[in-house]
Image: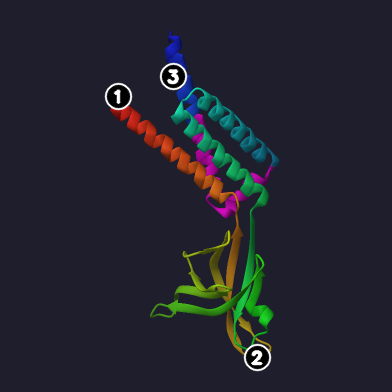
Amino acid sequence: MFSNGTRTVFGIRLVAVVTLLFLAALSAILAFPKTQWMLGTPWAKGAVAAFALVCATAAVAALFKRRWLSTLFHAGAAAVAVGGLVTAFLAQTWQVELVDAPLTPRELRQRVVNGDTVTLKDFEIETYPNGMPKQFRTTLTFPEGDRTLAVNQPLRRDGITYYQMSYLPVTDPYGHSWWATVLSLRYDPGAPIVFAGYGLLVLAALGLAVRETLR
């Protein structure tokens, strides 16, 4: 039979493993906008909210007992869960098309994003020798100046992330053929909270490693 001390250690480790597994699943969902819809279901929101409440309660209890590593761990886990909930309720994704044609009406070359006018300045397609597209990038003009984004090189500004998605051929009102750049804009106020939670978890892991090394 196990002693009380052994049972306590086993219980703590079991809770830690379950917590890490839940965090791993939540992180996998948050990592990709296409999977974040899973957090929109009522049962998922309820599970994440319950997890956040349990972790926050455990963090407060550990704080009063001056168990600093436990406080960091549970606070980090709670922050990741809260960030996930904020993402589920408030995150938005939308798509815009901007036409790279000098004679195109202004409304086709610019959009108002977060109160600022964003105008397409240039769209460039880089190709391989065989003519296949290698890279394509978009230069946008903001009130403070020009900034460029490309495939796998997003642009972040004022809490909104701009992703280069694709491009397509268009014809202007005068019959000329041009390219339209297709951008995906993402607003996710929960992301900073999630990253802060991961930071606390890393600190807890480092603290645990140092403590075990010094024993």
Q: Residue at x 65, y 90 (%)?
A: 175
Disc number lying in front (1 or 2) = 1
SS at mark 3 in the image: helix
Q: Residues within 10 Å of mark 1 (few under 14, many from 20)?
A: few
SS at mark 2 in the image: loop
Label 3 belongs to which residue?
A: 9
Along the polypeptide, which appears first: circle 1 or circle 2? 2
Q: Could you tell whether 123 is left or right of 39 in the image?
A: left
Q: Which mark is residue 215?
A: 1
Q: Main secondary structure of the magenta part?
A: helix
- Please check the rendered image and state whether residue 38 is part of the magenta-colored stretch, yes or no: yes
Q: Residues within 10 Å of mark 3 (few under 14, many from 20)?
A: few
Residue 165 horizontal/vertical position (percent): 55, 67
Question: Disc 1 marks which amino acid?
Answer: Arg
Disc number lying in front (3 or 1) = 1
Residue 202 horizontal/vertical position (percent): 42, 40
Question: Disc 2 marks which amino acid?
Answer: Gly
Q: Which mark is residue 175?
A: 2
For marks 3 and 1, give the CA distance. Answer: 17 Å
Q: Could you tell whether 201 is left or right of 177 in the image?
A: left
Q: Residue at x 47, y 22 (%)?
A: 12
For marks 2 and 3, give the CA distance. Answer: 75 Å
Q: Which residues are magenta?
A: 18-41
